[in-house]
Image (cartoon, rainbow, N blue to C red):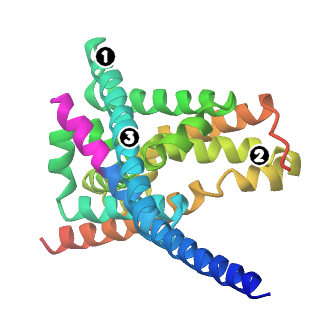
Amino acid sequence: MNYLWVFLVGGTLCIIAQIIVDNTKYVSGQILVMYVVAGVVLTALGLYEPLVELAGSGATVPLTGFGYSLVKGTFSAIDEKGFIGIFTGGLTATSAGICAALVFGYLASSVVKPKTKI
Amino acid sequence: MSTNNNNLQNESLLEQRLRETFKTVKQDSRPKAENAKHIARAFGIGGGICLLGQYVKEMCIGFGFEKADAGTISTLFLILLTAILTSIGIFDKIGHFAGAGTFVPITGFANSIVSSAIEFKSEGHVFGIGAQIFKVAGPVILYGITSAWAVGLVYFLIGLVK
């Protein structure tokens, strides 16, 4: 895996989002949704896998990679279990990330005091 | 009286010219310069976060983990790092500097969850933390899961026909 590709692909995916933020009314939350769905669609069309092979984390760490994991997990679950896989594959493949973010978030909220808003 | 009028006219002319200059500054030069800066920062920090993920992944592979597990560990590492940096208030500063460079990688997803959990603590455990923790992550998960489900359904049906 070439680290240059990791940096270039990951950075470019961020640039695209930055251009959208700077030139449209969309805010980060909306762009994250666009990115996940874009990742799902590109993976379904077979266009995202080559990018993952080329850039590794450069393609999987940006949120399009979340969509990639969802579809990849869904496909392999369908191959394994058939119809049920349509329902189990996506969340199974992304469970670690979602679980970690929720648990760490909850723990953080019980430790950290929120900043007072003015 | 007439000198006063002249002065007024001069001032208004000056004001007009100032306003026009201001407009051009506002419309042309400033946004472009800002955009270039934003883009450079997003590229550098975003690419850097991906590099860090790749580095951790390859380190785990070096320790003997399978490739898929190594990827998961590197994701967990980035999420934990984000949770810590968000808790101590540093993530906000990096995020302010890097823009899309921090919110597009998985760090942005994690930050949205951790920061909402902290922010809405005062509104209670159920309707505060419990509901608001999904403020940004909820839509991402909803549309991600639903679209992947639809794609999976098509994949399944194509498989049946074959």
Q: Secondary structure at mark 3?
A: helix
* In-front residue for pair A69/A111: A111
Residue B149, located in which quarter of the rendered image?
bottom left
Q: Residue at x 58, y 42 (%)?
A: B111
Mark number, residue B59: 1
Q: Position of residue B92 (x, y in %)?
A: 61, 39
Helix, strand or loop for the magenta stretch, by majority: helix
Mark 1, Cα crowd under 10 Å, few <14 / some 14-19 / many 20+, is some
* Residue that sits furthest to the top in the current view: B63
Q: Is residue A4 left or right of residue B147?
A: left
Q: Residue at x 17, y 59 (%)?
A: A46
Give the magenta-colored segment's residue range. A2-12
Q: Give the x, y percent position of residue B69.
A: 35, 28
Q: Residue at x 26, y 13 (%)?
A: B62
Mark 1 on the same chain as mark 2? yes
Query: Is A9 one of the magenta-colored residues?
Result: yes
The image shows residue A96, relative to residue B155, as above or below, that is: above
